[in-house]
Image (cartoon, rainbow, N blue to C red):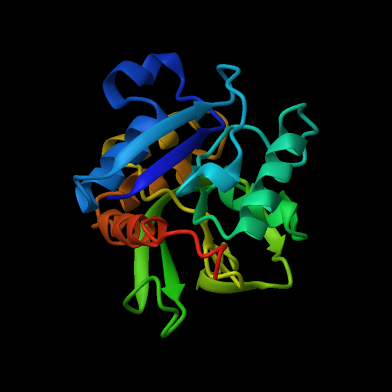
Amino acid sequence: MARITIIETGQVPPKYREQHGSFPDMFERMVRAEDPTATVEIVSIPNGDALPDPGKLEAVLITGAAAGVYDGLDWIAPLEDFVRAAYANKTPMVGVCFGHQLIAQALGGTVRKSEKGWGIGRHVYQVLPENGIVEGDVVAVAASHQDQVIEPPSDALTILSSGFTPHAGLLYANGTTLSVQPHPEFDVDFAQVCCELRDGKLPDDVVASARASLAEPLDSAKLGGAITRFLARKSIASS
């Protein structure tokens, strides 16, 4: 039975939270779809929760957020320290969207706003063959981001990529750290909400195209299942 600690770094706008839940709620649904026996604990940075000792955790999942990892907010540096400690301890750890970017920045990568602009809707990613984590040739998953990992850390292998997001999935050399840019925790309805939030802020044709793309099937369960199995690995710090 996996025991996963979700680090909540951002919150769903109140208007949508009652219907769709919080980001930890979405991840809990994703995890339990693969492993109904999993135990989930939540540490909420927006609610003022203190970061735990990663050496005492079985697995960590860092959520998305509206913030940029380079924003200099007072909680980002401590979270980077937490990531580095978890990495050194070989605590199984996954980051999604903001979490993907935060792990990369904490471990020596470069993150910034992409000149390509916002990525929303259904995105298709090439899968690195024989990566040991994600099966198949491609995965299609909902995205919602403007920031990107521009240069991965030296010990990170890119396992998911697209023309829009060259480093959309990273597997780290310690064998217990994985991160992805797209959102396997989003269902189609919430992916449509992310498009709605861009109405009036992006060109109409960009939003319309993103909305239309979500009529095609998503591989959210496939990627979410791979993440859940990855997190179920026990810490190998003592090996």
The residue lying toward the viewer, choosing from 188 and 184, is 184
Q: Position of residue 151 (x, y in %)?
A: 73, 65
Q: Quadrant of the C terminus?
A: bottom right
Residue furthest out toward the front: 238
The residue lying toward the viewer, choosing from 229 and 144, is 229
Residue 11 vs residue 155: left or right? left
When asked about the image quadrant of residue 232, the answer is: bottom left
User: Could you tell me if residue 154 is visible in this image?
Assistant: yes
**What is the count of numbered marks?**
0
Quick check: 190 above or below 159?
Answer: above
Quick check: 164 above or below 157?
Answer: above
User: Could you tell me if residue 115 is visible in this image?
Assistant: no
Residue furthest out toward the bottom: 130
Residue in the picture at 69% in, 66% down: 152
Residue in the picture at 64% in, 52% down: 103
Quick check: 17 above or below 108?
Answer: above
Q: Position of residue 73 (x, y in %)?
A: 76, 28
Q: Position of residue 226 (x, y in %)?
A: 34, 62
The residue lying toward the viewer, choosing from 62 and 146, is 62
Residue in the picture at 71% in, 44% down: 80
Residue 178 vs residue 114: left or right? left
Q: Position of residue 81 (x, y in %)?
A: 73, 44
Residue 214 vs residue 174: left or right? left
The residue lying toward the viewer, choosing from 125 and 3, is 3
